Image: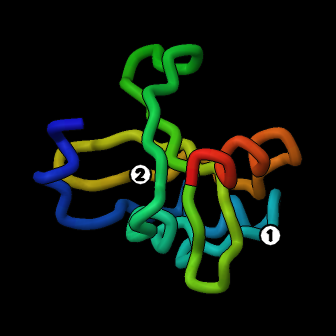
Amino acid sequence: MKTVRKIIGFEWDAHNRDKNLAKHRVTDEECEEVFFDERKNILKDLLHSGTEKRYIVIGSTKESRVLFVVFTIRNTKIRVISARDLNKKERHLYEKEA
């Protein structure tokens, strides 16, 4: 993905701050950590890309929690849309590829 090189940070505002903590017990910091995982996988989210392109990143946090994070890129920042733990099938695929 070409745009990753231009990224300078994350976009957190009142609409998405702590949203994943309430729904899935995933902190904003954990969401960010996934992007620094050397084994992460980034895929295009073709099913949910409507007015803006969406992507999925699957990766591990510092505490080895493997997360499924949906995000978009706005200008030069990553905006997390949702984050959750992997389900059993997804975890198996992640571990197999790693």
The quarter in which the C terminus is drawn is: bottom right
Is label 2 in a helix, a strand or a loop? strand
| Neighbourhood count class around disc 1 (C-alpha, 10 Å): few under 14, some 14–19, many 20 upward | some
The residue where tag 2 is placed is 79
User: Disc 1 marks which amino acid?
Assistant: Arg
Task: Identify which residue is drawn at 11% across, 52% down.
Answer: 6
User: Disc 2 marks which amino acid?
Assistant: Arg
Does 76 appear above or below 60? above
Where residue 13 appears, x then y in whole percent?
45, 63
Q: Residue reaching furthest bottom? A: 63
The residue where tag 1 is placed is 25
Viewer-side residue, 67 vs 17: 67
Task: Identify which residue is drawn at 48% across, 73% down.
Answer: 33
Q: Which tag, 1 or 2, sits closer to the chain's start?
A: 1
Where residue 43 appears, x then y in whole percent?
46, 33
Task: Identify which residue is drawn at 56% across, 20% down.
Answer: 48
